[in-house]
Image (spheres, rainbow, N blue to C red):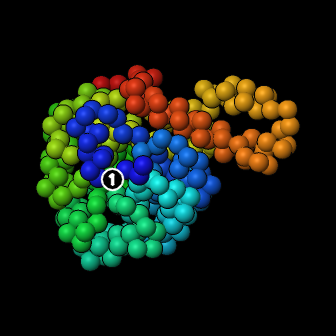
Amino acid sequence: MKQSIHSLNQKRVSSEPISWLTCYDYSFAAALNDSALDMILVGDSGAMVLLGYPDTVPVSMDEMIILSAAVRRGAPNKFIVGDMPKGSYETSDYEAVTNAMRFVKEAQCDAIKLEGSGLMAHRAKAIVAAGIPVIGHIGLTPQSSAAFGGYRVVGRDNEELKRLHNSVKELENAGVFGILIEAIPPQSAKKLAESANTIIFGIGAGKFTHGQLLILHDLLGLYPNFRPKFAKNYIPAVVSQFLTRINSEQDLIAYGRATRKDGLYELTRLAVEAYVSEVKLRLFPNEAYSYKD
């Protein structure tokens, strides 16, 4: 069953962790659609892992729409969030609403995500007022990381934690239904989640948030350039299960032609299911995949 804002909020109320992954194309989206995953983010991280840019900044709205539409075609039964790229919402409410509307109309996304608070909370409020659900994003915000000292953990001292609390309140007042917090120590993230009146998703923010997000290419060990501390590669955990299934087939060629489950599609699906299971059981992220408080 496809998730909705209501069902996602029910998970928060009942303390059932929400599972979320990025995705950028049709084939991987189809594998995710065939899993118990709750949500998909068509992230601007696709700029790096799919399009080969050095960071997330260069990706355009047109590129994000193409990726998002492909994911929707592959995952018709998933709640999909389109990620507003840098330059698509900062300059005015009008531009923010116009570009957010493209995600909904052209790619059939269920919601959008944007980075920042303060002035960006006003942009979020305008998008919500236009009838489009919004997820905020604070902590480490890759689109503007250069202005805040580069890629680093946020929220270790009381002053930064206070600013994060204020950002949460600003975005809540703007009407967002969820907030992604990135690269925040677990205990600081726990305080944010406990005081919030909306869903707090985490990426690199420990196990106490209401939901977890990972980059699909990190989960699959598919991005060669680097892997952040909080990212777990799930392929080693499911390879033996995959091989056992494959080796049980007497006619592997016929099995592959009939099911297409003799390769990366099935290996991806198994890895995603392992991730979802660990998120639901609060086994991921553990200390090995969390920043120190």
Quarter of the figure with residue 106: bottom left
Along the line of sight, the residue nearer the viewer: 82 or 289: 82
Where is the C terminus found, in terms of image quarters? Answer: top left
Quarter of the figure with residue 200: top left
Q: Circle 1 sits on which residue?
A: 4
Q: Amino acid at mark 1?
A: Ser
Q: Residue at x 30, y 47 (%)?
A: 7
Q: Could you tell me residue 203's position as x and y percent?
A: 39, 40
Residue 108 against residue 225 in the figure, above or below? below
Determine whether, in the image, residue 159 is placed left or right of residue 223. Answer: left
Along the line of sight, the residue nearer the viewer: 16 or 137: 16
Q: Residue at x 17, y 59 (%)?
A: 174
Residue 27 against residue 264 in the figure, above or below? below
Quarter of the figure with residue 128: bottom left
- The answer to whether residue 95 is visible is yes
Residue 74 against residue 126 in the figure, above or below? above
- The answer to whether residue 43 is visible is no
Q: Could you tell me residue 254's position as x and y percent?
A: 84, 44
